[in-house]
Image: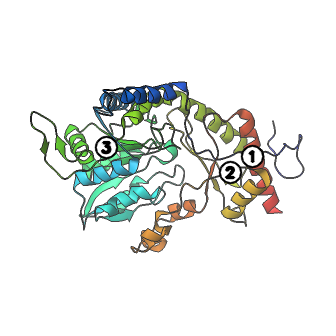
Amino acid sequence: MKLFYGRSQEGPAMNKRAIPFLPMGGIFDQDDVSAANSVLQQACAETGNFFPLPEEILFQEALAKHEGAAKAVAVNSCGTALDCCMMALGIQPGDEVVTTPLTFVCTAGAVIGQGGTVVFADVDPLTLNLDPASVRQRITPRTKAIIPVHFSGLACDIEAFDRITSETGVPVIYDAAHAVGAKYRGKPIGGRGKASCYSFQSNKNMTCLGEGGAVTSDDAAFAESVRQKKTFGYVYGPQLRVVTIGFNYRMTKPQYAVGLTQLAKISRVIAMRQRAMRRMNDLLRDVNEVIPPAGHGPDHGSHLYVIRLNTDRVSFTREAFIKRLKEEYGVATALHYPAVWSWEAFAALGYNEEKAGCPVAAKACKQVVSLPIFPRTTDEDCDYIAWAVKQALADLKG
């Protein structure tokens, strides 16, 4: 079928309808409901309790196996996972951590929270992942960690970051919030670098009743340090010990139970997303005004479908495009992400576009638009979204 947009179309115009950007990114089935109900029923019994947590052990073991890591430590969010990793590395005032400006605020916030300094490096213009070459230029004697983000579920150039660690000794903590189930060259990503930090928040490909996260690592000592940070600094044994300052970052018993059922279906969720995203790539391939995302092969975690408005080819703004899609064609979108330095809290600390010196990321952050692609997005939904994109572009071109 010949692709078209504009008012002189081949084939009939589509009936307008609403395509929301859903708050739930994965799939909830009856098995999830049953898992939560079972825990609640046990807790309501006369001898019931929400402790101990055998589900925690089961979930951590299942997650570690699924993500190809020796250890997994479940926590209550990916932001907390990053916080724990920064604490386990001993980040403190004067230390620098290199990361991407094209990410959610918690990636950089975890560094600021320990008193460290965020150093932004640029992104690859094709994948939008952190560019290892740019990272190398940012490393100084004060650099204590690197945090690449597997943006939208596409794994970073892990081998390049392995080489940087080997040559400099700087550890890599991967922000894998988008990337549960993602692979790098056919293998799970969870055991790479010093650690990986995952999110199970409600719009991710799996959720633990709205929130949740985890740290995976092949470094048993590091994983134990993270575990202590998430549970009051406890070391369990014949006598309970508190060996470090820790906090309460645990998930709850129902969350672990549902996490197990969610993890069991993650491969199906990703496959459903990949199918829809490949179709969208096909439908938008010849539309020069937008840049489809790269790398939607079998290894992609496929959490987000992020196009870029090709601002070199159009005279209107991304905001005008988003408004037209929503108001005229009912297609809701999201932004992943504004540049971290653009948020008020970071601007107040002196971060800005000029100081960051990341021209590729700065441009991309003004172009990105996430389209509403989800596991149950149908072929007809994809066709309508693509049609709406083309019509909105034609409208704005006048």
Residue 309, position in %: x, y? 66, 57
Chain-order first, disc 2 or disc 3? 3
User: Along the horizontal axis of the image, is 316 left or right of 252?
Assistant: right
Q: Nearer the viewer, mark 2 or mark 3?
A: 2
Residue 139 at least partly seen: no
Image coloring type: rainbow
Q: In the shown orientation, is residue 257 left or right of residue 169?
A: right
Answer above or below: position of 116 versus 261: below
Q: Which residue is mark 2?
A: 332
The crowd level at tag 3 (other Cα within 10 Å; few <14, some 14-19, many 20+) is: many
Marks 2 and 3, how far apart in space? 35 Å
* Quadrant of the image occupied by residue 190: top left
Q: Secondary structure at mark 2?
A: loop
Residue 195's tag is 3
Q: Which residue is mark 1?
A: 18
Give the quarter of the figure containing the N terminus. top right
Residue found at the far front of this picture? 46
**Three-letter residue code for mark 3:** Ala
- In the image shown, does 94 or 266 lie closer to the viewer? 266
Q: Does residue 317 lie above or below 170 as drawn? A: below
Q: Secondary structure at mark 3?
A: strand
